[in-house]
Amino acid sequence: EAGVAQSPRYKIIEKRQSVAFWCNPISGHATLYWYQQILGQGPKLLIQFQNNGVVDDSQLPKDRFSAERLKGVDSTLKIQPAKLEDSAVYLCASSLGTSGGEQETQYFGPGTRLLVL
Amino acid sequence: AQSVSQHNHHVILSEAASLELGCNYSYGGTVNLFWYVQYPGQHLQLLLKYFSGDPLVKGIKGFEAEFIKSKFSFNLRKPSVQWSDTAEYFCAVILTDSWGKLQFGAGTQVVVTP
C-alpha cells in the first residue's frame, strides 16, 4: 500500500516570497491533516480536512497560510508571504476517518523542509 | 488546556541497555494513545497504539508501552536497545470527541552508542 506522498521535500525561499506544498494521502483515507514541526518541538496541527471540508483550522495563521482539498483527495498548503519564523518541516498525514479507534490512526508523509532566509 | 509531556528531551545509552521513555497527558476523559518514531532522515512512523483493552501494548521492533489510567501515563519501554533504535520518539494523544486531533509531546531524542 502506498503511503502519504508529499512534495517538494526541500524548499528554500526568501522572506515575503510565496511557497506551496502538495500532499497525496493514502487511498481511501477521508481525513487529511497538515502539521507544522519546528525544530525541537512536536508537530502542531495547522488544519484538518474531512473529505473536502475543513474540520479544524483554529491554529492556521489565516493571514498568510491557506489550504485546500478541492476534490477530497490531494491537498495544497500555501504560505504567502513567508516569514522567517515559518522555517519548519510541514507534515501531511491521513487517516481513514475520525470515528474513533483504528479509524483515527494517522499515517505521515516524509514532510517538506522549508527554510526561509 | 490539554497537554502531553515527555519527561526527557535527550537520552543517551549503550547498546543492550534498557530504555524507558515517560509520557504523561493532562485530560480526564477517554483517550487514544500513540507512540511515533522518527529515524534519522525518515518520516514519522507509528510504533504502537492503544485504544482500549489490555493496557500493555506491544508494537514493532520489540517496543511495548503500558497505559496507567490512574497516572495519566503511557510509558514506552524496550528491554534491550540496539544502535538502530537511535531516533526521536514522540508520544501523542487523541482526546475523545476531538475529531481525531493528535496532540504531540515535544519528543525525546534517543542516541544509542555501540
Image (cartoon, rainbow, N blue to C red):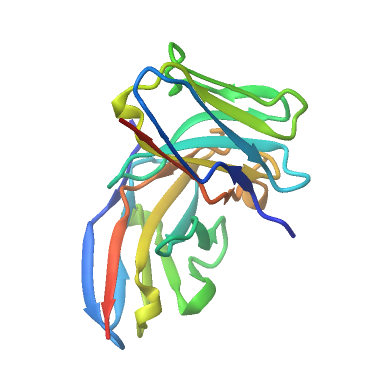
**In the rendering, at what x and y percent does residue B101 appear?**
52, 37
Residue lying at 30% horizontally and 30% vertically, measured from the top left: A117
Evaluate whether residue B22 shows in this view. Answer: no
Give the quadrant of the C terminus of chain B: bottom left
Q: Is residue A37 above or below residue B89?
A: above
Q: Nearer the viewer, residue A67 or B105?
A: A67
User: Residue sitting at 27 percent across and 71 percent down?
Assistant: B111
Q: Give whichever of A37, A104 is nearer the camera.
A: A37
Left or right relative to B27: residue A73: right
Query: Extreme top residue here?
Result: A63
Please give the count of numbered marks on the rendered protein: 0
Which of these two is toward me, B86 or A103? B86
Left or right, B108 with respect to A18, comes to left
- Residue in front for this viewpoint, B20 or B86: B86
State the residue at coordinates (35%, 85%): B80
**x, y percent for residue B71:** 31, 55
Q: Position of residue A9 (x, y in %)?
A: 51, 46
**How far from the left and from the top, in percent, is residue B39?**
42, 64
Q: Is residue A86 above or below residue B105?
A: above
Quadrant of the snapshot with the N terminus of chain B:
top left
| Residue at point 42%, 16% (across, down) | A81
Left or right: where does residue A44 sit relative to residue B97? left
Residue B89 makes an appearance in the image:
yes
